[in-house]
Image (cartoon, rainbow, N blue to C red):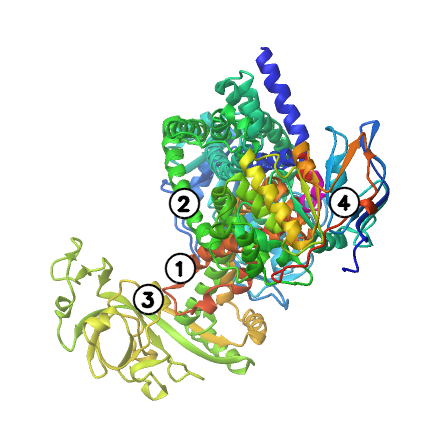
Amino acid sequence: MDSNIGVPVLRTRGLTKDLPLGSVTIHILRGLDLDIMRGERVGIIGPSGSGKSTLLGLMGGLDSPTSGTIEIDGIDISRMGEGRLTEVRNAKIGFVFQFFNLVPTLTALENVALPIEFAVKRQFNPRQRAKQLLEMLGMGDRLNHRPAQLSGGQQQRVAIARALANNPPLLLADEPTGNLDTESGRLVLAAISDVQRETGTTVVVVTHDPAIAGQMSRVLTLVDGLLVSTPPSAQIVLPVMPQPAIL
Amino acid sequence: MSHFRFYFEHSIRDMRRNSLRTLFALFCVGAGVAAIVSLRTLALSIGATLTDNVAASQHGDLIIVPRGSIFETSPTNGDTRNAVFTVEGVTAIQKWASAKNAQVMAEISSASIQLAAQGATTAGRPQLIESYLIDPAVYPFYGPVIANQPQNTPLSKLFSEPTDVVISQNLADSQKINLGDKVHVGRTTQLFTVKGIVPTQAEGVGPLVLFFGFAYFDQAAAPILQLDPRPDTLFVHGPPGTDTTALAADLQNTLGYVGRVTTTASTLKQNQQIADLIDRLIVSMGLIALLIGATGIIHTMLVVVRRRTVEIAVLKTMGVKGGQITMLFLFESVMMGVLGSLLGLLMGIGFSALVLSFSQRIWVQTLHWQIYPQALAIGFEFGVIVTTVFGFLPTLTAARVRPANVLRPNDALPPPSSWLQTLLALAIVVIGVGFIVGQLLPFGGVLLGIVGVAITLIILGLLVLAMWFIVLIVGALPSFGRVYWRLALRGISGHRFRTASTLLALTSGMFALSTIMLVSTSIPALLNVGFQNVLGGNIAIFQPLNPLTHLAVTKLLDKQPGVQHYLSLRLELGSLKAVNGDQNYADKLPQVNVSPLVPKGGAASRFDGAGLYKSTEGVISGQDVAAKGYFGGTALVGRVLNSADAGKLVVVLRDNEFVQQLRLKPGDQMTYMFNNRDLTYTVVGILQADASAAAVNTGAILGVGSVPLDTLPNGGLAALDFVVAQVDQAHLNDVLVALTTIPGTFTLDVGFIDTLIKKLLEEFTTIPTVVAVLSLFAGAVIIANTVSLATLERRREIGTMKAVGMKNWRALWVLVIENGLIGVLGGLIGVGIGVLAVLIISSGSNLNILQAVAWGQVALLLLLSLGIALGATLLSAWTAVSEKPLNVLRYE
């Protein structure tokens, strides 16, 4: 058994986020306590404006909370400086965005290699690793294509490969199929599931789609900045898979 | 009307919400407008200086010089003046004047009087100062001359003795002469006393006054200065309200042609024409800076349209038509033009004070700074028109956005405009800018302006295309696995047109500045070395044909430390009668065209294949081969002259086309005719060719030859006697000072030529330098704008890269590499062309590339180019790269 089983890869305590809007302050998140365990697949759902994407942004260190703490792999990132935060994002978190956000001037291979090249300590050879990941995601014949030469589904698969480049323990996806047709969306979701199964990476997906949420091992519902249903994580049986040799 | 209100409000809202982008765009327009305003202010100020109070600047209502009149006569006493009035002439004019209740004032002027402080360290340096021998009691009629030292003292109070002198401020500064100093003046041994220092502007804008200054003497000093006491200029002061044109006509009617008469009216008209010309010239130059600035508007509007593609698509789904979309963006473009021009007016007012101060320092003229409404008006007009026409093309693109883009916002890029639209937009640009240029042209009007602008745009288009290819090549350079280099190179090639036009803006500014700086630095050095080579030394001492003076000079040179060698020279005019006894030697030269001026049987004159004028007449140099340390040059064939050749009929020739074509060699016989006497010399050597020597002897097939001085016949009319010496730089000043103690000598050091050329270049390059600096400023603003737009467009890209682990400073580093490369490229191309210009100019000299080019300046200019690019990057990109990734990824 893995000694990390039952250890939260992400923990928030009293997490709040306020947004001053003129003379009014909007309370987007109102004190969230949340534990996400290693290997979990968590879906976050909720109506528009409930704070889903804000929560994802805070989890990923893209933004700073107004109060409370966020720990990733036991490291508190809530008061971290931008430089250190960038290193954490690079090593511990992979992002998949609704609009792919690939660098338009780089090829698929170069896009995937990017996080490895930014890493303070490189674990992998950038080009080799990028090629392996893209082949794993069925993009082996599109290595040297630029984003403009790829379909939406293909771009998103490149984005998933990029998110996995440094083998992060946490993969955060914001509406990953929101900009795709049904077939492409299905393929992307399958890719995420395959990756999670093969690597044991914790996956957190923000979505509006109940079908996608249904594929998750746990679903959190966010309403007006508060979690309204959080099954105790201890009750969830976590399937932990050995890491593939290539990773 | 409600549409216009919508356009207005929408434009203002967009500009306000994108304040940083708007600010840079406004600065782009502002920089160009500021250039126009400041240059127009300079032009108007120069115009005011030229036309304000002409009577005061010319010191009288009429100025009369005796040229070509019945009163003209030649001066005596070896005076170098062209002509002076006869005594009868002066009397006649005075008599006529008194009948008209007018006054007459006489002036003796001279440009050949040397003035140097006694024992001062700068003494002995030649000065081509203007000297005015005046009657202090009445001079001048208008515009009283008030001394700087003693402060506020009028000229009339400064003279008490005939040996008093009053000098201009620039002469005092350059010669380090102080009030009360004793000075050597002209050929006299009598010392003069400096009794006053007056403003340089007191005697107008003549080049000699400007470069070297002037001195006032009392007319009573004429005999001391060995000048003919008869005046060469008369000033007439009419009664109040005099019509100067009528007065001049009356003078000619009464006395006949008395000489050239200048009236205040004719001077005013002439100065007005000069002022108009300067105005048009300067403003045309300023337009370059504005056109550079206007490319910033194209960039900005293209980015505005691109970023608002979805918004345009949404508007179209709501029924807004393409034409209305064009109007909406054109409105924003015009708003930016108006606001940018207003900003430019404010900047221009500030710049104009700096430009005037700089120009004043170079020109030594008082240019009064004030806010000229005409300057502001033209700046505003040009700013708005140019911005509107340049902003038109991107707005056409906006109209072509399809409503379907609203469905696929992630792929929303505006389609390029059609050929027809592009041609229409270009036509509008050509007509709009042509209209402006047409207003500036002295002839041809708007039509010529339009043709000129069309040609200019074609040239600009070709230049942008050339830059586009350079950008293409640079973008394809290998990054050698360096991710930041790869990102920077891809960034460069991502927007090739924008990068190319930015590069062109920077290159233009750097080219203009570097060419002016490098050429004006190199020319004096080239000429300096050239003259030194021709002379065979670094000073030339001229003296009258006086054996005693010559003896005094050679004795002084013998005992002065630092004199490496000296040589007595005589340049003798003669003709080459025969070569090896053959009087038809000229037939052996390639003959293309025979000059019709050649008399039958006379000296042949020909044009060679290269069109170079050839004549059998020329100047040969007689050299004192027995002098101390005689240096005869470097022999290619045979030998140089030496002391053993004294008295022998031997000659050395410089290797040139003539020598080569006739295959002259040691042993050949050259028969020269000097002063109707034939002398046959034997060639003993061919000296190394000297390009600069050829430059001053072009056309003389006699060649640059040298013979022993004592073989030349005495009494030649065209002979010029002088001594050339080579003196160590460390002792040069002491030697020059010592030479001032020998009366009647005039010493020319090559450093003087250097100074003269530098002053001339400073004068001629003032306005181009100002324009180059302003263009460079516009270029810098364009770069800042481009970087700002690039970071704006790439905020999402930067945010993404930060999300996957790129730190702020590394994001900035990518932009620094990207724009640093543009800076280096702009510098290399711009400065490279400047270096090329210097190399072309120096190709005829024997200077090598290391000597000809001021490499220190090249390095500084390259650093400047890099500095501009990096400064602009840091200024505009830091905020963008510091943005939190979530803000960019979520809200944009």
Residue B465, disc: 2
Dot 4 falls on a residue whose secondary structure is helix
Report how far apart the C-alphas of labels 3 and 1 lie in the structure: 15 Å
Q: Which residue is mark 3?
A: B694
Tell if the residue under mark 4 belongs to the same chain as the one under mark 2. Answer: no
Chain where mark 3 sits: B
Looking at this view, name the residue that lies furthest to the bottom. B644
Q: Position of residue B21 (x, y in %)?
A: 63, 36
Q: Quadrant of the N terminus of chain B?
A: top right
On the image, the x and y values in percent for residue A163 come to: 64, 50
Disc number lying in front (4 or 2): 4
Looking at the image, is mark 2 or mark 3 earlier in the sequence?
2
**Counting residues from the N terminus, which is met first, the one under dot 2 or under dot 1?**
2
Protein chain holding label 4: A
Residue at mark 1: B841
First to last magenta residue range: B878-887
Q: CA distance from mark 4 to mark 3?
A: 82 Å
Image disc number at residue A59: 4
Q: Is residue B311 visible?
A: yes
For label 3, the crowd category at 10 Å Cα-Cα, with few meaning under 14, some 14 to 19 and many 20 or more, is many
CA gap, disc 2 to disc 3? 42 Å
Mark toward the viewer: 4 or 1: 4
